[in-house]
Image: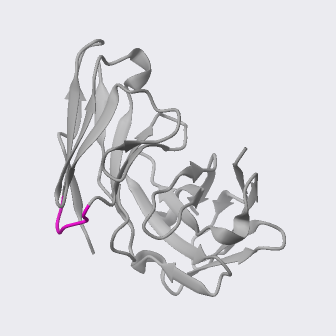
């Protein structure tokens, strides 16, 4: 069965960096787009970034552009999110999500909490 | 960017009743719209995609309709496990992929 397991969340000070990882299993990782979506507690969902197929095509939300970088290692079925210059407003649960172009997010990880606080 | 608005923000219903949730897009998304259910402490779960197709394992009491800019999620004969927050999402125009703000269905 499809499994997505995130790790790497925690408490970090503003301006510092954090790297999230997502281990995927149960499907052919290479043929799916992989995304990060975040949920601010008490608020809505926000799409953060996508890495398509071989990882060369990547897109970020404007709110994280220039600070976050998504990457993937297809040989290990891993997805990553390098988060730099973190701000308080980046505090959220970050989900690793599977989804292709013109298709919905069909599988979600359990999420990892990132708290940016001094 | 396509903006999605959902109404109402909160819907209070009783078990066994029908809940009707709305999602409106700022421009046409054709049928490229999905609905998700999220319970506290859990990841969202895909309910409906293509505006009206139930995802695998989703009970028939969940139904979706609409196209273009107006969409509806109907939950018939509400069960206790259906009380949650429901989000719509468009996947036609990206980046960014966008979500609505959510409708909370409570007792």
Query: What residue do we see at 56% from left, 66% from top?
Result: A35
Give the answer, above or below, for where B85 lies relative to A3.
Answer: above
Q: Is residue A86 visible?
A: no
| Residue B68 is a magenta residue | no
**Helix, strand or loop: magenta stretch:** loop
Q: Which residues are magenta?
A: B25-30
Way the structure is coloured: one colour
Q: Quadrant of residue B84?
A: top left
Give the answer, above or below, for where A19 lies relative to B77.
Answer: below
Does residue B11 appear left or right of residue B93 in this picture? left
For the C terminus of chain B, the image quarter is top left
Comparing A90 with B25, the one in front is: B25
Q: Quadrant of residue B2?
A: bottom left
Relative image position of residue A45 (x, y in whole percent): 41, 55
Query: What residue do we see at 54% from left, 62% from top?
Result: A99
Name of the residue lying farthest toward the right: A76
Comparing B10 with A4, the one in front is: A4
Q: Is residue A74 visible?
A: yes
For the N terminus of chain B, the image quarter is bottom left
Does residue A50 appear left or right of residue A11 in this picture? left
Does residue B4 appear left or right of residue A67 in this picture? left
Relative image position of residue B70 (x, y in whole percent): 16, 53
Relative image position of residue A115 (x, y in whole percent): 58, 57
Q: Quadrant of residue A80?
A: bottom right
Give the answer, above or below, for where B37 lies relative to A114.
Answer: above
Relative image position of residue A102 (x, y in whole percent): 42, 67
Count up the numbered dots.
Answer: 0
Comparing B25 with A43, the one in front is: B25
């Amino acid at each position: 069965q499809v499994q997505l397991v995130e790790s790497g969340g925690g408490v970090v000070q503003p301006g510092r960096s954090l790297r999230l990882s997502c281990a995927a299993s149960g499907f052919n990782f290479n043929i799916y787009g992989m995304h990060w979506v975040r949920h601010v507690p008490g608020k809505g969902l926000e799409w953060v970034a996508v890495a398509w197929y071989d990882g060369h095509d990547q897109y970020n939300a404007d709110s994280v552009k220039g600070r976050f970088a998504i990457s993937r290692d297809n040989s290990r079925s891993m997805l990553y999110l390098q988060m730099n210059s973190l701000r308080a407003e980046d505090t959220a649960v970050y989900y690793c999500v599977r989804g292709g172009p013109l298709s919905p997010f069909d599988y979600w990880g359990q999420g990892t909490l990132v708290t940016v606080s001094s | 960017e396509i903006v999605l608005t959902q109404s109402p923000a909160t819907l209070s219903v009783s078990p066994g009743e029908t809940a009707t949730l709305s999602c409106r897009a700022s421009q046409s998304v054709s049928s490229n719209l999905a609905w998700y259910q999220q319970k506290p402490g859990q990841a969202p779960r895909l309910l409906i995609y293509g505006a009206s197709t139930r995802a695998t394992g989703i009970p028939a009491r969940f139904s979706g309709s609409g196209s273009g800019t107006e969409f509806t999620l109907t939950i018939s004969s509400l069960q206790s496990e259906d009380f949650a927050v429901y989000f719509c999402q468009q996947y036609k125009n990206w980046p960014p992929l966008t979500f609505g703000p959510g409708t909370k269905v409570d007792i």
